[in-house]
Each structure stands twice: as structure tokens, then as C-alpha cells.
Image (spheres, grey):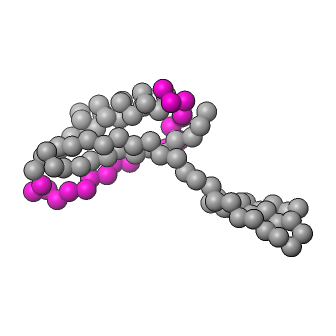
Amino acid sequence: MSKYETPDYEVLIKEGEYEIRRYVDLFGAIQYSGFSNKSKELKMKKKLDIWIQKKGYKRQSNYMLAFYNAPFTPPMFRRNEIWVRIIGV
């Protein structure tokens, strides 16, 4: 049996047969509304960190910020998210 790995796939070859396994990335995310600012982002990052530790995961990347709405969208309808890649401990 041969085994080849790339960053995203693992290929196992066994006597003319092959099996491809895709690695799956896990992300932790938190969603919040309103206009985003540094203090709100910091507060949400801390909440996300607490959740990650409580569930037994470990942070694997920097935080990623996602803003979905146009600037003229009313604050109560705005959607923002913070993502971070996680791994099981």
C-alpha cells in the first residue's frame, strides 16, 4: 500500500484501488450585529476564545473578520462575523 499526502488530500493506493480522503478544516465563528469597531471586535474575540477553550479546541490561525452589509444598512440589520481556524486538542 502506498500513501501520498498533499496539504488538502491524502491518497491511499492498494493493489490497483485508490481512496482519496479530503482533510476538513474546522472553524470557530461568532456573529454579531451593529456597526463593528475595535472594542466590539475585542469583546467578541474574547467570547469566541472562551467558547473554544470550553469545547476543548485550540486556536490555529489569526482571527478573520467578515462584514456582509453595505454601509447604509441600518445597524440592527447589519451582520458581522469573526472566524478562527481551530483544531481538537
Q: Is residue 62 visible?
A: no
> Residues in magenta?
54-73
Please check the rendered image and state whether residue 70 is part of the magenta-colored stretch, yes or no. yes
Vertical order, 7 against 43 (above or below): below
Image quadrant in which the C terminus is located: top right
- Image point (29%, 31%), residue name: 43
Q: Is residue 62 left or right of residue 22?
A: left
Pinpoint residue 21: horizontal percent, then vertical percent: 68, 60
Pinpoint residue 71: horizontal percent, then vertical percent: 14, 56
Q: Nearer the viewer, residue 26 or 38?
A: 26
Q: Is residue 7 left or right of residue 53?
A: right
Which quadrant holds residue 31? top left
Pinpoint residue 72: horizontal percent, then vertical percent: 9, 57
Q: Is residue 22 left or right of residue 81?
A: right
Q: Nearer the viewer, residue 55 or 49?
A: 55
Q: Nearer the viewer, residue 61 or 29?
A: 29
- Image point (44%, 42%), residue name: 28
Q: Nearer the viewer, residue 13 or 43?
A: 13
Please check the rendered image and state whether residue 60 is part of the magenta-colored stretch, yes or no. yes
- Image point (64%, 59%), residue name: 22
Q: How many marks?
A: 0
Image quadrant in which the N terminus is located: bottom right
- Image point (23%, 33%), residue name: 39
Q: Main secondary structure of the magenta part?
A: loop
